[in-house]
Amino acid sequence: MPESPEVQALVEFLDERVRGRVIAELDVDEYRIVKTRGRPPGALAGGRIDSMQRFGKYIGFRTTAGWLIVSFGRNGWIRWHAPGTAADDEPVPEVARIALDDGAALQIVDTGDFLAVAVWVVDAPEDVAGIAALGPDPLAADFSADDLERALGRRRKQIKALLQEQTSLAGIGNAYSDEVLHKAGLAPTVHAAELDDGERERLFRAIVDIMSGALAGRRGLPPDRLKQAKVEAMAVHGRGGQPCPVCGTTIVDHVFSGASAQLCPVCQADRVGDGFAGRVSIRR
């Protein structure tokens, strides 16, 4: 699933190339993705793109005809075709295409087994309910320990689930929640209410370091390289059966409460001392 570092890198890459261009055509191949029936995306044709922005995991095209908001869901993305470049010979699961006046094109694709990409045409980003409800963004310059404290509170919610809760913190998903918890030395099953002051400070520093470091590592990459770069940079996520880069212990796949995580059982030993609840497996 695209998460905020890759989405921000995508937005910056595209903004340099589409700002000031006019939308020549906006064609939708799969109308189930359109969530604003009264304002079809095609109505933006003729509008000039003034800028692109990110809102959590959403991207927004600000145009003179309104905002186009895109949510990628689990398997959505954008394929960029510069002016004068030939289309790919390999068929792709395109759900919409934006053609610009200079000959460039943006394909919105969804490679999943079920359709999850969604688009809206609105007057303001906050008209999309998911954006209006977003919590503080760890990639924002003003993100603070107080923002995290308000998200944590004394809640009896497992910390991995809380990190992925977009109304609490915007932009973190399954992969980066694993990376953050590994760096902070916290088990995913620990409840927010159980974290002491030192653990809260470690968690804040881990969130900032992991998310900002990931963005720094993705900036400047073209869209077709961002997902693979994310996979290659993971320390524990998707690394079940491999050695922990910190202590060398085998990383395990941990299934609990209908969720899953990859973690180091030594670096992230359960602080309350009762072991990891759920099913743990080691890939060989």
Image (cartoon, grey):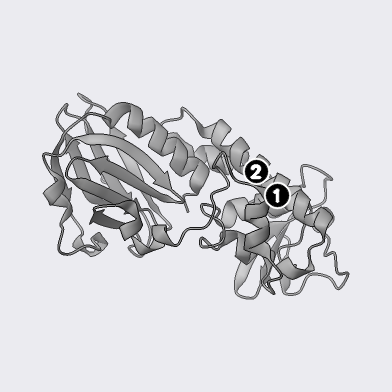
- Mark 2 in CB contact with mark 1 (< 8 angstroms): yes
Q: Residue furthest toward the right?
A: 273
- Label count reads 2
Q: Say if residue 110 shows up in the picture.
A: no
- Tell me, for residue 247, which label it has, or none: none
Residue at the spot x=53%, y=37% of the render? 229
Identify which residue is drawn at 57% across, 32% down: 217
Q: Nearer the viewer, residue 124 or 86?
A: 124
Check the image and report above or below for 9 versus 27: above
In which quadrant is the C terminus drawn?
Answer: bottom right
* Side of 273 where 189 appears, left or right: left
- Residue 180 % position (x, y): 68, 50
* Residue 7 in picture, x, y percent from top left: 44, 43
Q: Residues within 10 Å of mark 2 (few under 14, many from 20)?
A: some
Residue that label 2 marks:
208
The residue tagged 1 is 204
* Relative horizontal placement of residue 268, taking residue 39 as reference (left or right): right
Residue 194 image position (x, y, % from top left): 79, 68
* Label 2 residue SS: helix
Give the percent coordinates (x, y) of residue 205: 72, 45
Q: Is residue 1 left or right of residue 25?
A: right
Q: Is residue 6 visible?
A: yes
Report how far apart the C-alphas of labels 2 and 1 lie in the structure.
6 Å
Disc 1 secondary structure class: helix
